[in-house]
Image (spheres, coloured by chain):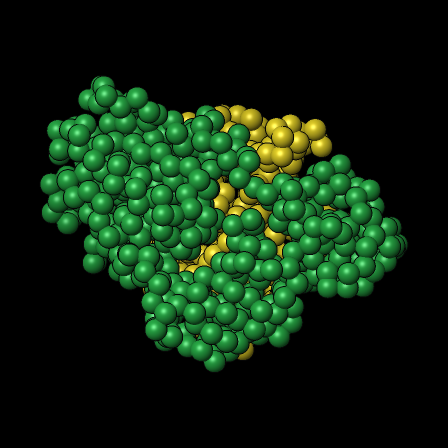
Amino acid sequence: MTEKTIARHSYQLSQLRVLESEAVHIIREVAAEMERPCLLFSGGKDSAVMLHVAAKAFAPAPIPFPVMHVDTGHNFPEVLDFRDAEVARWGVQLIVASVPEAIEAGKVREEPNGSRNRIQTPVLLEACEKHRFTALFGGARRDEERARAKERIFSFRDEFGQWDPKNQRPELWNLYNGRIHTGESIRVFPLSNWTELDIWHYIAAENVALPPIYYAHEREVFLRDGMLMADNEFCRPRSGEEIFTATVRYRTVGDATLTAAVRSDARDVEAIIAEVGATRQTERGATRGDDRATEAAMEDRKKEGYF
Amino acid sequence: MDLLRFATAGSVDDGKSTLIGRLLYDTKSIFEDQLEHVEQVSRDKGREYTDLALLTDGLRAEREQGITIDVAYRYFATPTRKFIIADTPGHIQYTRNMVTGASTADLAIILVDARNGLVEQSRRHAFLASLLQVPHLVVAINKMDLVDWDRKRFEQIQEEFTAFAARLRIRDLVIIPISALNGDNVVERSAVSPWYDGPSLLHHLEHVHVASDRNLIDVRFPVQYVIRPQTAKHRDYRGYAGQVAGGVLKPGDTVTVLPSGFSTTIEGIDSLEGPVQEAYAPMSVVVRLTDNLDISRGDMICRPRNMPAVTQDVDAMVSWMATSPLREGTKLVIKHTTRSARALVKEIQYRLDVNTLHRDETDRELGLNDIGRVRLRTTVPLFVDDYRNNRTTGGFILIDESTNVTVGAGMITDPH
């Protein structure tokens, strides 16, 4: 956006610029007040936007904290390539907290169904402890999930990384309380007030780079529990699940054993905005197996220290 | 498209969840999988109807107890505006949540049950909205269908509320008769109330003018972070990052920096989009100054003949949010704009009964959810304005030094 569009209405910022200013304020507060912040970077669209906003917050100086990827080992290769390219472009330090390494070392045990969703949490917590991170930025949004709608922007976590929804710090005006004792930490969600559509409008306005799997492409898939799973080395069809080719894209990217594709012809950002604006399914409802486990799956995982 | 933040308040069974459900449903902001989920849980719980309240009660404990325990934030958009709802619980024990939700709100909706008329909670919510200086107030008189859309009943409650509001500082008040359950006057004007000639609730939310609510007169720029790249490309760059809290900053303006009191001029303003000729709230920008002064986080940039009060003695209305009471002599941490200091509670001048607005000057302590007038002495000077002139430079939080928990919210009164 140009200078002109900012001041088009008299002293009225567009809602996207209000959200961006708020996110920048939050990121700068953390950098100014917290000892060792780190930005969680999965290569997904929300973390791509986070990194983009963080870079703007400190420009022309570099981003003053490292990024961390909690790697389940079940990645889409396009996402790993994107992660490495982004880290190089912004000149930030990348820390990889590896679930396969933790399994190998006997620190966590893989669940019988092969899901690494739950065992991500101890790996994340161990990495935080090792690097003594006091604040972790996450790209989570309150519109994603009903437990998230209740979470603060500065989400206090005890020495076990646990969230206690009944005992949250009141959050008033733009004054954030990041005071903690040794061992405790704060999860910070600068994009809390953004919706999926805001993210896409921002990606369009700012030309934010994304992994190609967000855009429509042909892929070998099969149907499982009503979701379109990609056929890949981590996720193979079981008997009765037939592989076919479909034109799909991803609305979220995560563990390749849990993240499903949606049928779509949207090959560019404009087409995606039109599609997301018209969709009747939330991104998690459509594509994430992990939230379907129980009625309060996300809340329960958060209490254990997950994001 | 612009943004409106609003808070909803009401007592327990006045239909707040139904209203929010209705707004989300009628603006197509509820997704099929969310609705299926609510239908499923409603069936599992043996309800005969789809309980839209389940949509807003996200936590296990809330569903178990059937009550809302914390502020939740929800989002919807129409072609003209994006909305952020701070959904605040109505229980008396959650006054702090109403204060939290109202602190950032442009508008507050207070729900009143047409059958019961104004109850204590309606008055308390109106008082809290005025204390927090929420610029626009809507009283939605709900369940009008249960009083047969009786015009007299509506006018009676309207008169009663207007009389009460006259004692408060409320700038803009609109009263709308609705039925959240049936959707009358929520999104569309309804034929059931031909005598009502005002807007529907959503129409009002879409069109209420909020651009002029911000202070564009008094320049206030709390320095948040100093940007000094010291790279080959930007060896001499030194900028002061922050979010504009008031007024309009322009390159070439003479400014004074507190606490040093030195004056200089603005050399340039770098916004997130590049250099700009003007910066105003709530823009996050970087200000560059002509002279190399010693400026750090917690300092304040303002105009030479328009400065905030510089003071270590702060008088404020304090909303107390902790179970252990606030007493005279208590030491706390105060966070005000980008400045933190230690504060001593010198005096609790009175405790306010938020239902009657009576000032109890004999009560020298504040309990959980109490509001009172407090005098604080801080270890370093703060740069403060009257909260009524600027919610950012007039508001602060109090933090317990031992637990690190946020225990109070303050609104500064008469700083000079």
Q: Residue at x 86, y 58 (%)?
A: B292
Q: Is residue B167 above or below residue A171?
A: above
Quadrant location of the C terminus of chain B?
A: bottom right
A242 lies left or right of A54: left
Q: Residue at x 37, y 74 (%)?
A: B365
Tell me residue A147's x, y (percent): 36, 53
From this viewpoint, is residue A72 visible?
no
Quarter-of-image position of residue B394 = bottom right
Q: In the image, what residue occupies the spot 27% across and 48% down?
A: B122
Does residue B222 lie above or below A103 as drawn? above
Could you say where residue B51 lies in the image, as x and y percent from the top left? 20, 42
Where is residue B26 shown, x and y percent of the image?
31, 29
Would residue A187 be found to the left or right of residue B292 on screen?
Answer: left
Task: Find chain B in the image and tell me its colour.
Answer: green
Q: Quadrant of residue B149?
A: top left
> Which residue occupies the foreground of this view, A22 or A121?
A22
Figure label count: 0
Chain rendered yellow: A
Residue A136 drawn above or below residue B158: below
Residue closest to the eye, A5 or B392: B392
Identify whether B183 is placed above or below B389.
above
**Residue that appears at 45% across and 31% down:** B208
Quadrant position of residue B62:
bottom left
Seen in the image, is B217 located left or right of residue B8?
A: right
- Can residue B98 be seen at all in this image of the molecule? yes
Q: Position of residue B295 (x, y in %)?
A: 77, 62
